[in-house]
Amino acid sequence: MESLKIIEQLIDNIPEGSYQEKMKPIIRVPEGRYYTAVEGSRGEFGVFLESHGDKTPYRLHYRSTGLPLVAAIDTICRETKIADLIAIGGTLDYIVPDIDR
């Protein structure tokens, strides 16, 4: 009940006017291709940006941190037992939706 009272007070104090303003683009990326990477908690996180000099980039791609782990699984799992796969997967600490995208 107290939360509802607080919400009602907030609704009563919303100022009049538009809630969204149109803004001009702040940053215009120069024409070219750019790639940068930083070290994340699970590996390298990269961003690739390609621009034709317009307001929005032509291409924007994120390199997930779990992708190199998928390539390493074949090497790591050679000559191991099936029971070891659970321990190997837990050690790599990969995130399936991150790899799947």
Image (cartoon, rainbow, N blue to C red):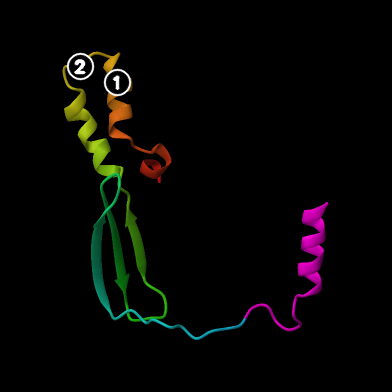
Instruction: Give, as a single range, the part of the protein colored magenta.
Output: 1-20
At which x and y percent is residue 20? 64, 78
Going by the numbered disc 1, the residue's amino acid type is Leu
Figure check: 46 above or below 82 = below
- Camera-nearest residue between 57 and 47: 47
Q: Residue at x 58, y 83 (%)?
A: 22
Q: Residue at x 40, y 46 (%)?
A: 101
- With 25 as the anchor, is 64 left or right in this view? left
Compare residues 81 and 55 and report the one nearer the observer: 81
In-image side of 101 versus 77 (left or right): right
Q: Quadrant of residue 61?
A: bottom left
The alpha-carbon separation of the residues under discs 2 and 1 comes to 8 Å
Q: Tag on residue 85?
A: 1
Q: Amino acid at mark 2?
A: Thr
Q: Position of residue 35 (x, y in %)?
A: 24, 65
SS label for mark 2? loop
Relative to 92, does residue 14 appear above or below in the rendering? Answer: below
Mark 1, secondary structure of its residue: helix
Are the two marked residues, 2 and 1, in contact with CB atoms closer than 8 angstroms? yes
Q: Nearer the viewer, residue 31 or 37?
A: 37
N-terminal of the pair, mark 2 or mark 1, is: 2
For label 2, the residue is 80
Which quadrant of the view contains residue 52?
bottom left
Residue drawn at (76%, 82%), measured in percent from left and top? 16
